[in-house]
Image (cartoon, grey):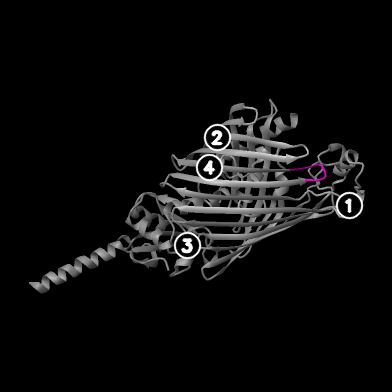
Amino acid sequence: MRYKTTFAALLLLLLKFASATAQTGPGDLRVFGYFQAALGHQQDATIDRKLKSFTLQQLNLFLQKDVGQNWSAFINFEVANSYSSQRNWGAFSLEEAWVNYNRSKQFKLKLGLLTPAFNHLNEIKNRTPLLPYIIRPVVYESSFSEVVDTDEFAPQRAFVQAYGFIPMRATKWDYAIYVGNSPSINTDPRRGVTGIDTTRTFLFGGRLGVRHGFFKAGFSATHDKFDARVLRDSLQMRFPQFSFPVDQFQNVAQKRIGADLSYMAEKWFFEAEYIHVAYDFGAAQADFDKRFFYATLGYHLSERVLAYVSYWDAHENLLPVREQGFQVPTLGFTYEASEMVVFKVQSANAHFDGVNPEIDKTYNYTYCAVSVRF
Amino acid sequence: MKNFKRILLALVLWAASVSAQVAVIANKDVPMDSLNKAQLRDFYSYEMKQWDKRVPIAVVDLKLPGEAKEAFYKFLGITASRMKSLWLKKMLMGEGSEPLAVKSEEEMVQKVAVTSGALGFVSLSKITPEVKTLLIIAQNEKEP
């Protein structure tokens, strides 16, 4: 708590300094950001339980500065779910802090804490002004992380990324390759410095894509290994009849494969993604594979009004423990009141099903929100 | 008399065609004398952020709608609002900023003339010797 308060005070000091020195010309520190406040109504259709709540869903604060002819630095602070350290609500995090070297269109480099390129949405999932959604496609929605292992579907963080595009006539070939930590991060101060990868392996990943006019498609993949011995111990205790050799859980390979597609034509836009996550437990009788798919079709009713329908489908194996999935059809509208202010409405019908325990639940969500840039 | 009318009509048509044409203009320090549509689109959408010799590109846009703005974005094959979305995306990804925005074509010429690396567009009739013309777009020129 004391640490959080000190950090918040330091941030306030930094912002005060930044606002006093910020200019509008190139090379000066730029401070900008956005927030999204929402009113949500959630209904558990099975037992007719209703919840209504206001929330400051997300606030992001960016600092950007050109720090050399081809270099620029960028910092992204994020607070979520009406953050208050005093009341233990929500979360505050440093999402990104990187320096970008822009050599040419063919070669750019990001160094530092960054969100890596994976499919279409991963890099922009927290940029609420760019998205028509209030509730994002589930694996990109941090507020659903208690229901779905959102971190496992897409890589959250990397530390070095080289990227760029190669033009060939009217077509552009995009690439991005990156390196980051494996998911086995120390969170216990008694075991040493927290936030440090405890394995000898790295996350490696990349995306290859193509753009032609308003058509965009890509293929993404990542590979890393993590230490799942704690998980193994709990599995062995619960299922003594199965064999879970310790060595099979020490360095479990995790592979993500993704594909994305988007297209814009006149007033229409379409985007879709597929993600498959596979784990290699060797001879152990465990299967944690996951898959996710979403597709969105949107139509600009006017210059300021956008309507869309979207469908999300996910399936998670946690075998031999359980198996679960969910399907979410959703629709929404956005209204651009000004360049800085956008109103959003979204309704979703989320159906969760599972085996062990048997789950068959349907939730209706209706949200309205205001997204403000500053 | 007939000939006079014909000449007058031709002059009116020529004048109309000149005013309908749009010129892509740049500051005189820009190290290019011409550019093509693909380059123009890359520069305006911040895919390219520097001219040759590493001079930073300062994109200038017209705030208000008008004939020149409409013709310019039609030539690029993108609507002005979609271009704004691209700028917003680049800005929020930390890889660009919103362009300099001016209220009139006269102000556009002045801004481009005094801003190093500036790139803008105006009706052909608004060009002054203080700026460099890189490309002329005829209004009926379509996206290939």
Q: Position of residue B109 (x, y in %)?
A: 37, 57
Of the two numbered discs 2 and 4 in the rendering, the one whose residue sits closer to the viewer: 4
Amino acid under disc 3? Arg
Q: Are marks 2 and 4 on the same chain?
A: yes
Magenta part of the protein: which range?
A318-323
Which mark is in front, 1 or 3?
1
**Could you say whether the residue bearing mark 1 is in a helix, strand or loop?**
helix
Q: From mark 1 to mark 3, how far is it between C-alphas? A: 53 Å
Q: Is residue A236 above or below residue A247?
A: above
Q: Chain of mark 2?
A: A
Image x and y of residue A200, in percent = 85, 53
Q: Is residue A120 left or right of residue A227?
A: left
Magenta stretch: includes residue A40? no
Q: Is residue A321 magenta?
A: yes
Q: Residue at x 48, y 66 (%)?
A: B39
With A240 as the anchor, is B3 left or right in this view? left
Q: Alpha-carbon neighbours of circle 2 within 10 Å: few (<14), some, or many (≥20)?
A: many
Nearer the viewer's eye, disc 3 or disc 2?
Answer: 2
* Residue A367, numbered circle: 2
Indicate which label's residue lies in the foreground, 1 or 4. 4
Q: What residue is drawn where x is 43% and y is 44%?
A: A304
Q: Amino acid at mark 1?
A: Gln
Q: Earlier in the sequence, mark 2 or mark 4?
A: 4
Q: Specify the subunit that label 4 lies on.
A: A
For numbered disc 4, what is the local secondary structure? Answer: strand
Residue named by callout 4: A331
For label 1, the crowd category at 10 Å Cα-Cα, with few meaning under 14, some 14 to 19 and many 20 or more, is some
Q: In front: A155, or B87?
A: A155
Image: A86 above or below B61: above
Mark-to-mark CA distance, 3 and 2: 38 Å
Name the residue beneath numbered marker 1.
A248
Q: Earlier in the sequence, mark 2 or mark 1?
A: 1
